[in-house]
Amino acid sequence: MASRASSEQEIDELLAYYSPPVGVLAQRLRAVVQRAVPQAIERVRPGWRLIGYDLPLTRSRSVYFAWVWPELEHVHVGWQTGTLMRDPHDVLRGAHLKLKKVRYLTFAPGQRVPAKAVADFTRDAARIALMSRGERELLAASRHDPGSGG
């Protein structure tokens, strides 16, 4: 089933749980994700306490590809296909936790958000999320092949 976008009120209710600086940072990251992939459907995932982003595939199907996840002391922005994304400066986090697919960045209140980098990662995640399973498998194989240079 395709995702229904959350209202601003639903998002505000989620963010009200956090300190104002964390809420402001989450709003900033939301804006970057929305500008990068305007067709994304933004939806509060109450069980995970995060804001998730889906891309519509058909009228009744969508694919989850990104999130903004506030926590008490910081906010994560992450991507479901992170291990397949381009990361030329090796800044994405998650490998140290042995996460098999996802990668993310974490920002503390007051920290500068590199909007261009976050937007580039978000667009790359959307591109990969829209690939067929076979295309993603081929991309994964090329990333892990020592002779591929990737």
Image (cartoon, rainbow, N blue to C red):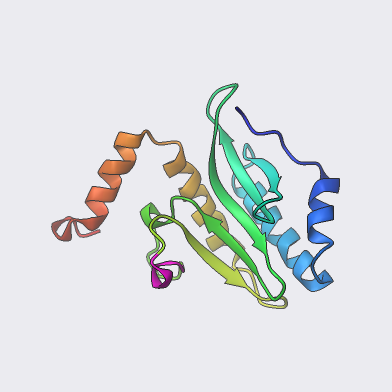
Q: Is 47 rendered above or below residue 136?
A: below
- Residue 47: x and y, percent? 67, 51
* Residue located 60% across and 21% down the image: 59
Q: Single out the residue that lies furthest toward the top.
A: 59
Q: Is 64 rendered above or below residue 118?
A: above
* Residue located 73% across and 67% down the image: 25
Q: Is 104 rendered above or below residue 133?
A: below
Instruction: Out of 33 and 20, give the one closest to the viewer.
Output: 20
Does 68 lie within the magenta span? no
Instruction: Out of 141 and 10, give the one closest to the viewer.
Output: 10
Q: Single out the residue that lies furthest toward the left.
A: 147
Q: Is residue 143 left or right of residue 70?
A: left
Total numbered badges shown on the rendered structure: 0
Q: Is residue 40 left or right of residue 44?
A: left
Does 96 lie within the magenta span? yes
Q: Is residue 141 left or right of residue 132?
A: left
Magenta residues, start to end: 93-98
* Residue located 64% across and 54% down the image: 48
In terms of image quadrants, where is residue 54?
top right
Q: Is 105 rendered above or below residue 10?
A: below
Quadrant showing the N terminus: top right
Q: Single out the residue that lies furthest toward the front.
A: 47
* Residue located 72% across and 76% down the image: 109
